[in-house]
Amino acid sequence: MLLKAIHIIIGSFLLSIGINGCFVPYHLLDGGMIGIGLIIHYLWGIPTGLVILFGSIPLFIMAFFVKRSLFYNSIHGLLISSLFIDLTAPISTWFHFPIIASALIGGILIGTGIGLMLLVETSTGGSDLVGQCISYWTKWNVGVIIFIIDGIVLLIGCRIIGTYAFLHSLLAVSAVGFATSTLVHFGKPSIN
């Protein structure tokens, strides 16, 4: 239980720093529910964490019926990460890396945060939760599934953020997918 709490807190912190410190200054997108939260934040100024929280409700209902343990394990990840995302929102004005560095660093931070939570079978909701459900059914790598879902959301958001931010968001989503799948693949103990 303590290990899970540590993973959720550190993962949520890394995720929130990646979003607010790297993505928001350049209107970059991630995919999944985070990407949807960012799109709505960029359009109407609604706090990203709040959008993620309410947008994940239907996905949590799905998880409740697919694999109840995902539902129960991920509630904490959703609540804590949404809170951290909104609490760390002010850092988006504190400093700015160049856009390519922001895309890479932000992607790695977000992917590592997600990966840490996935290692203890929790998530932030959103595409993480959908990815876990699909992985449960298919046994595919959850990081790859999340990468595909993220790409779809990114394509939807392209018109809102523009071509320049879209191209850098592709790099960011690639970094998220790489960090998540690498951490999940190498972080789990091998069974012989």
Image: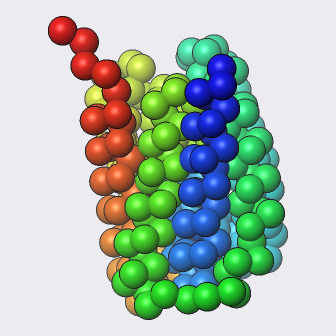
Q: In this image, 112 relative to 189: left or right?
A: right
Residue 71 in sight in this render: no
Q: Position of residue 93 (x, y in %)?
A: 70, 87
Q: Is residue 179 above or below residue 184?
A: below
Quadrant in which residue 50 is drawn: bottom right
Q: Residue at x 78, y 63 (%)?
A: 86
Is 162 positioned to the left or the right of 160 in the image?
left
> Looking at the picture, how far across and down is residue 155, in whole percent?
43, 67
What residue is at 52 percent from the left and 27 percent from the top? 120
Q: Residue furthest top?
A: 192
Of 9 and 63, the residue lying toward us: 9
The image quadrant where one finds the N terminus is top right
Q: Quadrant of the C terminus?
A: top left
Residue reaching furthest to the left: 192
User: How many labels, in total?
Assistant: 0
179 w.r.t. 164: above or below: above
Give me the residue at 57% from left, 62% from top: 35
- Image quadrant assignment for residue 173: bottom left
The picture places residue 127, in percent across and down from the top left corner, at 52, 44
**Residue 52: percent from left, percent from top:** 70, 52
Q: Please name whichever residue, 86 or 55, is drawn nearer the observer in this view of the structure.
A: 86
164 vs 37, left or right, is left
Viewer-side residue, 86 vs 151? 86
Q: Does the image show residue 138?
A: yes
